[in-house]
Amino acid sequence: MTALPAVPETQARKADHLRICLEGQVQCAQATTGLERYRFTHCCLPELDLQDIDLGTTFLGHRLGAPLLISSMTGGTDEAHQINRRLATVAQRYDLAMGVGSQRVGVENPDLMETFAVRPQAPGILLLANLGAVQLNYGYGLDQCRRVVDQLGADALILHLNPLQEAVQTGGDTNFKGLLEKIAQLCAVLPVPVIAKEVGNGISAPMVRRLVEAGVAAVDVAGAGGTSWARVEGERATDAHQRRLGQTFGEWGLPTAECILQARKTAPALPLIASGGLRHGLDIAKTLALGADLAGLAMPFLRAASESEAAVAALVEVLMAEMKTVLFCTGQQNLAGLRQLGVLEKVD
């Protein structure tokens, strides 16, 4: 692989994020997804052949082999490039959706945009570009958004919302004033759908309503219970003040399950992605039963992709087998059946 250019600050931060997520203790220790409060009603006689169960679904007009999104993770380094290519190759094989990490580093240094380039490995997948929404207050606009979409060959643009991460990050971009209006202006002119996504602290019902009114095409609630980006930024902080913030707010956020329920009640027809602490197919199935259309996982895929393409494929296989087992043992032949009354119940 061709060596990348000298390391600027944003690229160094990307490398830190990758290292800390793989090696550090940055998972929520007390905050949970809330999914543990739900269980499926077992069906002892499903009247189904397991082989006939269908995990197929459609999201933003794209047919997927399973309701699975390889969530936005990385880019900007040689290691990230290898990870993205492994993920994309497997996403193509199984007809999955995939997002890339924030492409800001590629806007700052166009030579690094190649670390996100996965269309050669995945010409047919639903592929999502990614920028921080706050960058709209720091000189970014339609031109930069179109650039990351066009250079990736993306089908939609994720705008990630990360106020806590920016507040804890040393030198973070913390001017979020007036962003909703700028998001609305972008949604009106960008030629691909815009997806609003948190990064692990959740999106509340009032914010879902405001984002939908602004014109976003879909929402990824990304609730608490998984990787804590406050902890990540606290780990890489260069001073005691920022490290303290990371420790104090390491468990901050709304549980993923609560976010799904609120979002679906607020916007019944909204294309909805559930992420935040999902670790297996049973978690995925619960989010779908609660109202999500698609489920996103990051950390499990990151760990697998850092090992090999085969490890990523093995992870997909087991996730799909787990989802099919849920459907089989609840007597449902397809995903729509998970939302039927009585299939999932609250246990507390």
Image: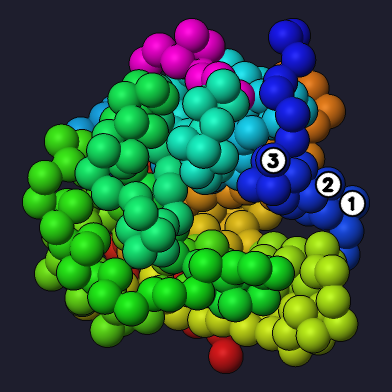
Q: Which element carries disc 3, helix, strand or loop?
A: loop
Name the residue type under label 1.
Glu
Name the residue type under label 2.
Arg
Is residue 65 among what the camera can see?
no
Label 2 – label 3 distance at C-alpha = 17 Å
Foreground pick, 145 / 192: 145
Q: Which element carries disc 2, helix, strand or loop?
A: helix
Q: Residue 194 vs residue 25: left or right?
A: left
> Would you name the residue on which mark 1 appears?
23
Foreground pick, 71 / 106: 106
Q: Quadrant of residue 190?
A: top left
Residue at image x 31%, y 41%? 145
Residue 296 is inside the magenta segment = no
> Would you name the residue on which mark 3 appears?
8
For residue 19, the mark is 2
Q: Which residues are magenta?
A: 114-124
Residue at image x 74%, y 29%? 6
Q: Main secondary structure of the magenta part?
A: loop
Check the picture and name the quadrant holding the C terminus: bottom right
Q: Nearer the viewer, mark 2 or mark 3?
A: 3
Check the picture and name the quadrant holding the N terminus: top right
Q: Residue 216 vs residue 303: left or right?
A: left
- Dot 3, how many residues are within 10 Å of its Cα: few (below 14), some (14-19), or many (20+)? few
Do the residues under discs 1 and 2 have CB atoms within 8 angstroms? yes
Do the residues under discs 1 and 3 have CB atoms within 8 angstroms? no
